Amino acid sequence: ELAKEEPGYEVIAERKLPKHPTAEEVADQARQEIEHPEKQPTKVGDELAVRKGAKYEVIAERPLARRGKKVEPKPEGLTRAEVQRMPPRTAKALRVGQVMGEPIGYKKGSKEAKIAAGKVLTRVKTEHKISEELRGSFLKIAETYVTDPKDLKKLTRSILALTGKSPKRKRVLIRKIRQYMEKEFHKTALGRVKTAGKTLKGKYGRRGDPVKEMRPEFKGMASRLMESFAIPNLKPDTKINLDAVKSFAADIMANDELAEQYPVAYRQAKALINELRGVTEKSFPVRLLSTEALDNLADTMEWLMHEQEWANRQVGMEQGDKFEDIKARLKEEIVVRAKRAVPIEKGDVFGTFKRGAINFADIQHRNLESLCDAIAGGRSGNFSEWFTNQGTFTDSVYNQIDAGVDKQYFAAEEQRALVTKLMDKHKITDKLFVKWHKDKIPITINGKVYNLSSVDLMTTYMHSRNPHNEKALLRNGYKWGHGFKQKSTGPMKIAELDMILAHVTPQMEAFCEDIGNLMFDGLNKGLINKTSVEVDGFELATLLNYFPAERYLEKRAKGKTPRKLFSFVEGMGILQERVGTGEPLALRGIFETIYRNNQYVSAYHGMAAGLRNAKAIVNDPDVTQMMNENGYREYRETMIDLIEKVEDDSAETDMLEKFWAKRISKAAKSIFALNPKLSPRQQISSALYFAYSDMRFVKDMRHIMTPDVIKFMQEYMPQEYTRIKRHQYDRDVGTAMLEKEPYRYFTGKALKRDLPLYPMSFFDGNAISDGVRIAMAEVKHNQPDIKVDSQEYIDLVKKRASWLIRHTQPTWHNKDRTKLGATRNPLTKALTMFMSQRAKLVQMLVNAAEDFKYSNKTSQDYKRLGKVYGSVMTNAFFIALFDTMFAALVYRKRKSLKDFLVGVTRQVAGLPYFGRVIADTIRAADAMVTGKGYQK
């Protein structure tokens, strides 16, 4: 049946499918069919077609033209449809051949052909011995793309004489062929624009208006785009209006909200403005636009169509509910749990102070999940209540982001594993890693000598693999440093670039090639494109031999700098190659570039879709109105602030903030290093699980990490696993550990300065492991019908364990920080150091009080309230008891019962933010009364 769909042919013979041949036979058959189609045997002397159907394969076809029917001329090469209809093994052999550099299988100028040809050129550039197979592929590319007969003759002669020991000659040949390839790709890009325009017009055009049925938020932009570029009647000589195009792009850049919500569109508009910066004519032919600009236009139209469809459906929510149904349920929850604020009379100083104190205790101690729970009908910690009472607001906002973080961490571990594998493969030890950073090689550029490290040379090598980056180096050069230490090379000459590349050793080159092929063009490209298709409707990462080309910018553009999702896209540098800003490239070492790019890529892959869905709920006009009318205005504003902090966690800070952040981090690690009693206290917090669980599960606690629990966390709970492995158990320590993270990332070794933190990680891991064990026991007890180790069991244990840990233990990730805990203000950070656990205890008290307030006040409700408050007080009791015993056993200090009770009081008083001031006041007062003096 599939064979009969092929236009221009009819089936005249078929047979039952034979047994599949071997992979070698299939590969050989595929190449023979392509290279020598005239030699293939057929029953009627016509072209042989091998296509797999349900039970039969076609063995002979006859052109319909023999019966007087019109046949469309067949394009050059095999079409995608033809490849798809081949048996899987045959199609696979074709794809393998194409990846190896054979310019076959797809029409000349397509993205696939571009990738295949690029891989051949990369092999020619890097391989030290030119095999006959590679030379043949190189010749085929030249014959395919070089249209000038004289040039083709010269290039053919040079390719035949080429050896692997002439890197400079190879680079000259490759640059020449790339120029011809660029012409074909420009033609293809122009075709993309025209095709996208026709598709857009066909979908939404009615009665002479090409965008009549588009939504208002996209219609104006699409209409001006179609008019400015005369789409879809676009031809190479079609003239476009410069002012109209600039106005179209400027409107996108001027819209802060649009730029923040749709960062890709912003980047494309900025690229278009830069492209047209040097154009002075009022109108000019479209052929003068670069391939990148045309690709931007095609991407923009595809993005517009994607956004139109997404806005119409409002899908993407994890639970799959329709947007309107979600809003209807939200309306019920918000109305039921209305938190109307009682108006304060003008001049009521006490009332104003009271309201401010309550708001501080409430808002400042809440995190995003707590705010969502308050609006959605908060979840009680009891398993049965937690299992049945899942608030819509929490599921639609917080859970979307939480799932995204899991996805981000899984991707990050995959990246890290690949980096470790490549470091081991190329024998890059920690000593060699440090040596490459410290080595200085004098390089002369434009008459000046610059000392570049080995990692800088490797960065230059990676840029030279990408024609866009190489062009930027030749036109603009490098710039690095700040203030008096700032250096700039200026435009480079090809000879100077070749001189830099000559210092790259074979070991460096081999590592760079693997990083480029397996990381940037492999793993990361797949992660980016999978997400960008979902979020933006097209693949962002399409360039071969991609390497981040970050521009060195002295100042940002005037106006508000778009952030949020924009920061992920900007940080990846995926679109930088399309931006001809005229600014030099920022020089960063290759390892720093890999680390930064991997962080952004994993964040984009994990967070982009979830953040977008969460913001669709919070920013919806109907939801906003419902929240404001029911007294949740401050909650909504705080939620938006916290979501933006999650999105913009990578935002740059000014020099003063960096100065203090570094010192706060050092202070945090020093406190842990100098105070050994802090680490064992962390395990005491495992008793807090019984605020939300039954005491019957005490027997399931082991109070120590075991391999089975660690394996479960590694496979299904990436946030908790990362917490243990990366010391991310507290805001201050977790942030401090990021300071030298790149060294650990590439070498897999810890620094000596980190050793004092391992006891804390050990005891924290024990507490986290107990949370997982309790969740396993709860699921087995409450859901006996669920088979252990089934996917349903795993999902339920994961969700329950994560919930218990988040609600009782200190947290590090921005999504779980309170409003005050998520601040970037250095002074506030210093004053709230090590408050993560205390803030969590206050959250437990506030949430329990709120749940009780909206309950039916039954005996079970009183019991749940008592369990939470009792657990918090018990935790304070045990910490004070531990301090007393530690003082007696370690410091040989005897403490009385009164000292112990003062310690308990201090623990309770010090729970809120800045509560340590109260706690220290109690301690000082006690010292004055007893005459002991102020003691720590």
Image: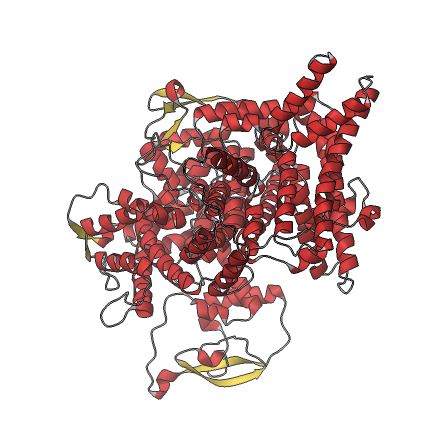
Is residue 214 something one can see in this rendering? yes
Between 623 and 823, which is closer to the camera in this rendering?
Answer: 623
Residue 502 x %, y % = 46, 30
Which residue, as the protein is rendered here, is positioned at the far bottom? 67
Q: Residue at x 27, y 49 (%)?
A: 251
Residue 83 x %, y % = 48, 68
In screen coordinates, is 773 left or right of 141?
right
Q: Is residue 320 above or below residue 550?
A: below
Residue 15 x %, y % = 57, 83
Q: Is residue 752 above or below residue 625?
A: above
Residue 435 x %, y % = 57, 24
Between 513 and 697, which is closer to the camera in this rendering?
Answer: 697
Which residue, as the protein is rendered here, is positioned at the far left? 282
In screen coordinates, is 153 left or right of 366?
left
Q: Residue at x 67, y 54 (%)?
A: 857
Between 682 and 485, which is closer to the camera in this rendering?
Answer: 682
Q: Quadrant of residue 898?
A: top right
Image quadrant occupied by the C terminus:
top right
State the count of labels.
Answer: 0
Q: Quadrant of residue 487?
A: top left
In screen coordinates, is 87 left or right of 240?
right
| Protein image colouring | secondary structure
Q: Is residue 673 above or below residue 238?
A: above
Is residue 532 something one can see in this rendering? no
Between 608 and 815, which is closer to the camera in this rendering?
Answer: 815
